[in-house]
Image: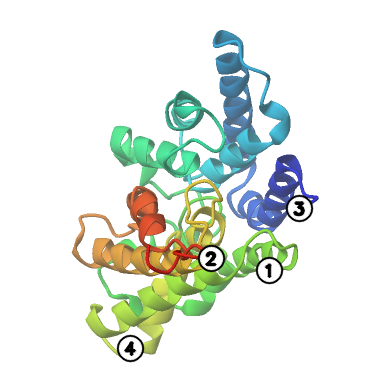
Amino acid sequence: RAKDSTSRVMLYVIIALLPATLFGIWNFGMHALLLILVTIASCLASEWIFDKIVHKKNSMPDLSAVVTGLLLALNLPAGLPWWEAVIGSVFAIVIVKMMFGGLGQNFMNPALGGRCFLLIAFAADMTNFKSSKFEAYSGATPLARNEGLSSINVMDMLTGKIPGTIGETSVIAILIGAMILILLGVITLRIPAAYLVTFAVFMLIFGKEPMNANYLVAELCGGGLMLGAFFMATDYVTTPITPKGQLVYGCCLGIVTAVFRLFGGSAEGVSYAIIFCNLLVPQIERFTRPVAFGKGGAKK
């Protein structure tokens, strides 16, 4: 019943991603801009070609391919070779999205599907963060350092003076975009709030430095947690539609992300956690469906 069309909602998401995108271009330079343009163009081309091959109506005007390309780019290191970004874009659109029926049918977030594929196929390039404008901060991301997060300058993480992917470094830019999404009514706080609160409680109790406030804030600001919580965990297609389901989904995300970070082989974990929880959505919706209203509804 809403007046907003799919293309309008996607346009809102693109607008909300602009602060993180512009900061990423300013921070990492023209190579970041090139990578963003390459991924968007590759996603659009992949969707257009696939539609032509299977004789489907052109779905490019809904702008979902643009959002996928932009999100994928923001989850890539600026120094990634452009041809690897093309491969990730094709995988995200063709394999994750279009092979399952297109928008509304994909079982996981396409951008994260493409990113995780690149993490497996090109692990060295995907973990190389040496092209930041802030040369003093180049090298391993804060989550991958050995000296402990309690020694990290949290203000640097808020403002983006740390190594990382194009769109994840500045928490302030991400939060500005998140506020835009919330004010425009594109997302609610159910999933992001449940995600971040559950993650914070888990890390506060079971983290490497329990009950350490600086460590907790660094974990929240580090990696792709904020970008994932507001822009990828809230994807309409791969998240529950029931309010209770969204809360359960957010809690699952927080626990799985914390477990991956603490006990997994990677210092990150957000991308894999979101994809894993995407697979749980059908079961979450099954057990959180509202009781049918009317005679006999409560019994069933």
Viewer-side label of 1, 3 = 3
Residue 179's tag is 1
> Tag 2's secondary structure?
loop
Residue ID for mark 4: 212
From the viewer's perspective, is 244 left or right of 22? left
Q: Position of residue 270 (x, y in %)?
A: 38, 57
Q: Position of residue 287 (x, y in %)?
A: 36, 61
Residue ID for mark 3: 2
Q: Residue at x 47, y 45 (%)?
A: 77
Cβ atoms at labels 1 and 2 below 8 Å apart = no
**Do we see residue 140 in this rendering?**
no
Q: Position of residue 230 (x, y in %)?
A: 55, 62
Total marks in image: 4
Viewer-side label of 1, 4 = 1
Residue ID for mark 2: 294
Quarter of the image where the C terminus is located: bottom left
